[in-house]
Amino acid sequence: MIEKDGFDFVFDESKCIECGGKCCIGDGYVFLEIDEAKKIADYLNISLDEFGMQYLRRVGNRYALKENGDNPDCIFLDSKRQCRIYECRPKNCASFPFWDIFKKNPQGAFRECIGVLKK
């Protein structure tokens, strides 16, 4: 169980396997810092340039992960709806469900994720 100060819930990370990647689908951006991009490129055993061309898109002056073809699923969500880079996923993903939006509205976290449990 993961617990964070200021949140009215805990997170059971083991539920990620059975949920089907609900936090990895839908509209939105997963922005990356350069260190995160390098870490994922290393994990995939490809160059940073290749990673950028294959997996990133420019959004304003930042870079975000591409979506999976014509649907809004994360490009790293596999056919079994598991994250292919879970061990080195970006901070934006790794911090889920402890986002400010859920601090203000914990009911949204409970609706969004089966791993979110009451304290």
Image: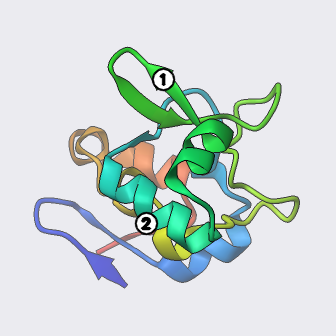
Q: Hey, which quadrant is residue 46 in on the image?
A: bottom right
Question: Which residue is farthest left?
Answer: 5
Left or right: residue 19 versus residue 49 is right
The N terminus - image quarter? bottom left
**Mark number for residue 39?**
2
Q: Which residue is mark 1?
A: 58
How far across and how far down the image is residue 54, in percent? 68, 41
Q: Are marks 2 and 1 in contact (CB under 8 Å)?
A: no
How far across and how far down the image is residue 73, in percent? 71, 40
Q: Please state which amino acid type lies under the numbered disc 2.
A: Lys
- At numbered mark 2, what does the secondary structure look like: helix, strand or loop? helix
How far across and how far down the image is residue 113, in percent? 54, 57
The scheme the figure's colours follow is rainbow
Could you say which is closer to the camera, residue 115 or residue 29? 29
Q: Hey, which quadrant is residue 91 in on the image?
A: bottom left
Q: Please state which amino acid type lies under the numbered disc 1.
A: Arg
The C terminus - image quarter? bottom left
Question: Which residue is farthest right?
Answer: 79
